[in-house]
């Protein structure tokens, strides 16, 4: 980085995070405290011990990366713990000047005998986020117009399949219904969640702004969940799908064409024609080019999570090999996200630092990355309110840009 000013700017600039998993973003001290309270066994009860055994700087593979979720999900099975962790997540974002987040999680992973209702699971998270937002929005800085308010949305995530450790309730259900095909159960569970999301949004006025699909792409295609996405689509909620994270570009194609995705989580393999495995696609290079062009033209926002991708796809090795540079060059609507603040050991500011330090990014391209986040979000209020929030964030951004980046023309700020 050329000067200290750039670093200050990245910290101070108003940011968004459109792709952050609640269960991957707990504070480590909170996880330890809750594990003791709920008698959840951890491999260590010290932060250093957990960083050594579970929440590492780098991971050898996806299996190792996912291990941490079994501990975090296990402590998130009470309304109180969901509310607390949502509150802390919002507070941590506010501290680093993130002013809009969309918190996602899979409510069905949190179902247990003591908390069987989806609406309790969703409203508890809302309570925590709302409390943090209200605290910030009452501060002198915000009321006097020196800072901008913090706002949020909730994205509920359906699962491509139910992992026994993470979703014991549904895994048990599958065991008790051997005559049903597993994929039918997954599909019904997604539909159940879609119904609940729409109902809760409507009846409780909770900002459930979007619907997501997560879990292993390979062997569990998005098309199996198309009924749930159609229901969400017909009820005007936002749609995002984890796609192209661990599978070829055809997974992104399916998310857009079968699930009406307005946004895509990761999209890491978008340009990788060698990752195309569908035999129907006769010219993989042309397919990737056309798909990228379509995504660019339709302004389908890509939620890029570079640190997470580097950890789960070791072959990328270095940010210079990550597709974020190409996405920026091709003028896609792409923004930076954390994915999992705890598990990936990152923050939104860190994601920006990593990209700025690793690839050539101009002042305008940096601005575009941030603006893509606020424009591409599934804002909970009216379109007019969304536009006003976009303007507020851009004005704040431009003011800070003048203060910290005035020495830079539009050449690369590295
Ligand atoms: Zn994710």
Image (cartoon, rainbow, N blue to C red):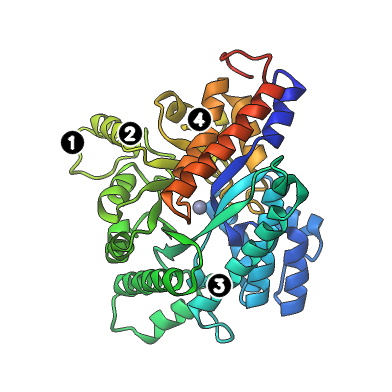
**Whether the residue under disc 2 has CB within 8 Å of ligand 1:** no
81 to 348, vertically: above or below: below
Residue at 61% in and 40% down: 15
Question: Considering only order in the chain, which callout, 4 or 3, is on the residue closer to the N terminus?
Answer: 3
Q: Are marks 4 and 1 in contact (CB under 8 Å)?
A: no
Q: Which residue is mark 1?
A: 282
> Answer yes or no: do the residues labelled 2 and 1 have beta carbons within 8 Å?
no
Under circle 2, the secondary element is helix
| Number of residues whose C-alpha sits closer than 10 Å to that of mark 1, classed few (under 14), some (14–19) or many (20 or more) | few
For the residues labelled 3 and 4, the Cα–Cα distance comes to: 33 Å
> Which disc, if any, is residue 348?
none
Among numbered discs 2 and 1, the one appearing first in the sequence: 1
Q: Nearer the viewer, mark 4 or mark 1?
A: 4
Q: Earlier in the sequence, mark 4 or mark 1?
A: 1
Mark 2–mark 1 Cα distance, whole angstroms, equals 17 Å
Neighbourhood count class around disc 4 (C-alpha, 10 Å): few under 14, some 14–19, many 20 upward: some
**Residue 369's spot in the image, x, y percent?**
52, 33
Q: Circle 3 is placed at which residue position?
A: 123
Q: Nearer the viewer, mark 2 or mark 3?
A: 3
Does any portion of residue 122 appear in the rendered image? yes
Q: Secondary structure at mark 1?
A: loop
Q: Position of residue 183 (x, y in %)?
A: 31, 70
**Ligand 1 has an atom within 8 Å of the beta carbon of the residue at disc 4:** no
Residue at the disc numbered 2: 292
Comparing marks 1 and 3, which lies closer to the viewer? Answer: 3
């Amino acid at each position: 980085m050329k000067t200290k000013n750039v670093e200050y700017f990245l910290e101070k600039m108003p940011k968004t995070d459109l792709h952050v998993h609640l269960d991957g973003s707990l504070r480590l001290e909170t996880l330890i405290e809750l594990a003791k309270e709920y008698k959840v066994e951890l491999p260590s009860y010290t932060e250093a011990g957990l960083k050594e055994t579970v929440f590492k700087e780098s991971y050898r593979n996806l299996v190792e990366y996912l291990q941490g979720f079994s501990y975090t999900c296990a402590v998130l099975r009470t309304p109180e713990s969901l509310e607390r962790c949502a509150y802390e997540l919002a507070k941590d974002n506010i501290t680093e000047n993130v002013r809009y987040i969309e918190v996602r999680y899979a409510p069905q992973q949190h179902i247990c005998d003591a908390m069987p209702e989806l609406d309790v699971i969703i409203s508890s998270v809302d309570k925590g986020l709302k409390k943090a937002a209200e605290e910030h929005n009452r501060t002198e800085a915000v009321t006097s117009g020196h800072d901008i308010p913090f706002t949020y949305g909730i994205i509920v995530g359906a699962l491509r399949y139910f992992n026994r450790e993470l979703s014991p309730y549904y895994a048990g259900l599958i065991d008790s219904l051997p005559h049903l095909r597993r994929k039918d159960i997954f599909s019904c569970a997604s539909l159940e969640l879609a119904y609940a999301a729409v109902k809760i949004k409507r009846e409780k006025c909770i900002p459930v702004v979007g619907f997501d699909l997560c879990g292993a792409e390979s062997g569990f295609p998005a098309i199996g969940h198309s009924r749930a996405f159609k229901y969400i689509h017909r009820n005007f909620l936002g749609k995002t799908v984890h796609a192209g994270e661990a599978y070829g570009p055809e997974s992104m194609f399916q998310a857009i064409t079968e699930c009406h995705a307005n946004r895509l989580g990761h999209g890491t393999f978008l340009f990788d024609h060698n990752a195309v495995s569908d035999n129907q696609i006769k010219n993989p290079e042309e397919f990737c080019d056309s798909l990228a062009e379509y995504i660019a033209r339709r302004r389908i926002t890509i939620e890029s999570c570079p640190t997470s991708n580097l950890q789960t796809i070791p072959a990328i090795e270095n940010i210079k090999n990550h597709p974020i540079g190409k996405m920026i060059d091709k003028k896609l609507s792409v923004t930076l996200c954390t994915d999992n603040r705890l598990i990936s050991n990152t923050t939104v500011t860190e994601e920006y630092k990593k990209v700025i330090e690793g690839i050539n990014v101009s002042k305008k391209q940096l601005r575009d990355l941030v603006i893509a986040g606020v424009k591409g979000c599934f804002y909970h209020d009216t379109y007019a309110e969304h536009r006003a929030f976009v303007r507020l964030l851009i004005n704040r951004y431009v003011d800070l840009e003048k203060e910290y980046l005035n020495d830079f023309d539009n050449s690369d700020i590295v």
